[in-house]
Amino acid sequence: MEVGKENGLTHRRGASGGEGGCSGRKRPRAAESGDFFDGLPDELVISILCKLSASAERPSDLIAVLTVCKRLNRLGLDPAVLSKASPDLLAVRANRWSVSSNRFLQRCADAGSPEACYILGMILFYCLRNREVGVWLMAMAALKNHAAALFSLAVIHFNGSGKLKSDRNPKVGVLLCTRAASLCYVDAMRLLGYCFLDGHGVHRDVSEGNDYLLLANAREFSAFLHYSPSSPLRHTRRLRSLSEGLDLWRATPPPEPHPANRFLVEWFATRSGDENGEGLGTCSNGGCGRPETRRHEFSMCSACGLARYCSRACQATHWKYSHKAECTPINQWLDAGIMADEAPLEGGAGGAELVLD
């Protein structure tokens, strides 16, 4: 319907009641012209979500994205995104463990995430006692050069975890430790060093053992300098003397435990010994959390007879950060000239060697 004529041009009222232009077309809506998200290709959105998945510091970082809209929920659960999941993204807490948590970790593991394979494998093997599937998942992570998974499998072989004492296989443990050490995993370097010192699973070589222990300490100190926000040398990275460096190394705080180990610590902290089996205990190293799978599986500190360890690596860590001040008779070790920053080795003064049952 014509509503008026001006300068020879006819104006018509649009369908929305407004006035159209001279072309007669409707003015585009803001939603149609301003929503660029729907125009992004799936490949680009998935690429962005992969970056988020790999750098997430907590599970809520990804969950918040999944709840935005159906499209982000669908793309956020794409296998390419889940395969890049960081350890912090997969950091499930023991008090929040549920069927949904299990399903999410399994979905990430099926997508090819080595972190998910390792974390779920540790939970199944030690907490839920599904040994076969747990070992298989850790092996899948180890095949992708996951250093922590390689070390955990080494500990299992050294102790014969989940099996009989006669099933211990230190030679396989040494091979797994060697591979993890080549990936600069500190605990593997330290455990391998003690294996060479003791001739456990490998030909005894004191020089090689000391080299591995020195390399482990250097690597641990280097990681603290580079990555710890509390490091006084984070920006300067200069030492005035070797003694200053040693004092700083002795004062370094214990490393943050892996989410898998933190889960174990929380899980068994809320459960009684009877539930895990009579006489069974957990590793005395507070950041480990591994439990015994049979009686007398772990080695005991022969000086105090109280602390037990799944490996010499955990013994050395616990000794440095707390046990050297708690274990008795510490005065005998100091009088004998043993370094207070290393756990007494086999044959050390005071009989403080780690007893291997």
Image (tube, helix red, strand yellow):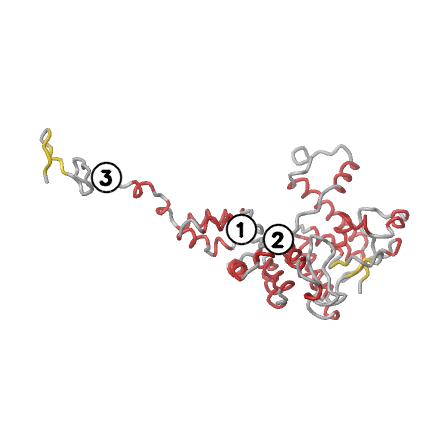
Instruction: Report, in whole angstroms, how far the alpha carbon at label 1 lies from the one at label 2.
Output: 12 Å
Image location of residue 310, percent across then percent down: 73, 59
Indicate left or right for 73 with 194 as reference. Answer: left
| Residue holding disc 1 | 59
Tag on residue 309?
A: none
| Residue holding disc 3 | 27
For the residue labelled by badge 2, is the local secondary structure a helix, a strand or a loop?
A: helix
Q: Earlier in the sequence, mark 2 or mark 3?
A: 3
Image location of residue 58, percent across then percent down: 55, 48
Image location of residue 145, percent across then percent down: 61, 56
For the residue labelled by badge 1, is the local secondary structure a helix, a strand or a loop?
A: helix
Figure label count: 3
Please report the residue visible at 35 percent of the width from the left and 43 percent of the height from the top: 36
If the image is split into quadrants, where does the N terminus sit?
top left
If the image is split into quadrants, where does the C terminus sit?
bottom right
Please report the residue visible at 75 percent of the width from the left and 69 percent of the height from the top: 165
Q: Residue 250's quadrant in the figure?
A: top right
Indicate left or right for 251 with 129 as reference. Answer: right
Q: Are marks 1 and 2 in contact (CB under 8 Å)?
A: no
Amino acid found under the numbered disc labelled 2: Pro
Q: Residue 273's quadrant in the figure?
A: bottom right
Image location of residue 171, percent across then percent down: 73, 64
Of residue 116 and residue 104, the one placed in the foreground of this image is 104
Amino acid found under the numbered disc labelled 1: Pro
Q: Residues within 10 Å of mark 3 (few under 14, many from 20)?
A: few
Of residue 90 and residue 2, the one placed in the foreground of this image is 2
Instruction: Report, in whole angstroms, how far the alpha carbon at label 2 lies from the one at label 3.
Output: 55 Å
Q: Residues within 10 Å of mark 1 (few under 14, many from 20)?
A: some
Tag on residue 259?
A: 2
